[in-house]
Image: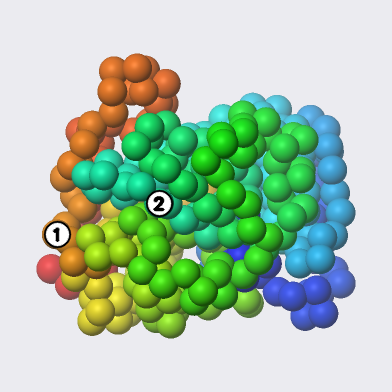
Amino acid sequence: RGGSNSNHNKMSADEQPQGLNGMDLIIDGWFHERGELWPGQAMSLEVEKVLDHHRSKYQDVLVFKSKKYGNVLVLDGVIQVTERDEHAYQEMIAHLPLYAHPDPKKVLVIGGGDGGVLREIARHPGVEEIVICELDADVIDVSKKYLPSLAKGYDDSRVKVHIMDGAKFMDENQSSFDVIITDSSDPIGPAGVLFETPFYKAMHGALREGGIVCTQGECMWLHVDIIKPLMESIRQFYTTAGYAYTTIPTYPSGQIGFIIATKGRGECNKPARKPSDEVQKQLKYYTSELHEASFVLPAFAKRAILGE
């Protein structure tokens, strides 16, 4: 939820209704996030100052300083990142697959232009290569300017940046990666392709044997109708497919999930490695205990998503 790769651009520029302008969502000094994927509810943040607003090649980009949540990145009217709570998402989407893998060497990030996932991957000294495919260079640019605590992920010498479509890159790099992380937006418009079976097949092809994918998996309070069929379809070709979640105030309903699937490897609900004491002191959310706990779903979600 921090970049674009046919993922954050909810609609292409020519489909975009001219009325969708991030500034229109600021009313009486408050930014209001209203979305068709969470009808009947909204998230509001008090705005201290608008830092940037423009239309990129793909989407409406808004950055503002909020009263309580630090700087906030909004793409096409949807909150992607706030400085106050971003670690709850970035740490979990990165460390769940990485610590479940005994020895990841090559890692691919699709989307994630803000750099937060890169920052977390860089905490793993054994990783030799970190590749990111981000479609919208503007997301990288505004993040480097206004979200330096995330964009410092780009400073690591192992990072290689490709401004291109992730599916195309994976097609050209088969059986190449130990871990693939898709930090995507919501399944509306072009974003929808990242929540369909072909995209999961593309990731499967780009994984090495024993590899793990972890993708933004939407919200159990809102989206079981999207999550359940996707889980069922990917189980047909991944060895295992699990569902975990994190709590984060500024995502719809305060919660977001992760789909974690493997190629020739067992379940990921127990970590194969643990953070060193030095790394654990730097982390704000992830722990080895939380790794296991995040796979334990409430009864309604377990029934709806896993059919149990």
Q: Residue at x 70, y 47 (%)?
A: 140
Q: Of residues 210 and 242, which is closer to you in this image? A: 210
- Tag 2 residue: 106
Give residue 53's position: percent from left, percent from top. Answer: 85, 49
Q: Of residues 163 and 199, which is closer to you in this image? A: 163
Identify which amino acid the numbered label 2 is placed on.
Lys
In the image: residue 1, left or right of residue 237: right
Q: Residue at x 56, y 34 (%)?
A: 156
Whether residue 107 is visible, yes or no, is yes
Give residue 120's position: percent from left, percent from top. Answer: 46, 37
For the residues marked 1 and 2, what is the alpha-carbon distance in whole angstroms?
A: 19 Å
Where 194 falls versus 298 (above or below)?
Answer: below
Give residue 62's position: percent from left, percent from top. Answer: 78, 49
Give residue 208's position: percent from left, percent from top. Answer: 31, 64
Residue 60 circle label: none
The C terminus, quarter of image:
bottom left
Mark 1 touches mark 2? (CB < 8 Å): no
**Total label count?**
2
Q: Residue at x 63, y 77 (%)?
A: 189
| Nearest-to-viewer mark from 1 and 2 | 2
Q: Which numbered disc flags the more N-terminal residue, 1 or 2? A: 2
In the image: residue 37, left or right of residue 275: right
- Tag 1 residue: 266
Q: Secondary structure at mark 2?
A: strand
* Among the 4 quarters of the image, the one containing residue 275: top left
**Mark 2, residues whose alpha carbon is within 10 Å: few (<14), some, or many (≥20)?**
many
Identify which amino acid the numbered label 1 is placed on.
Gly
* Among the 4 quarters of the image, the one containing residue 48: top right
Q: Residue at x 19, y 49 (%)?
A: 269
Q: Secondary structure at mark 1?
A: loop
Q: Of residues 250 and 200, which is closer to you in this image? A: 200
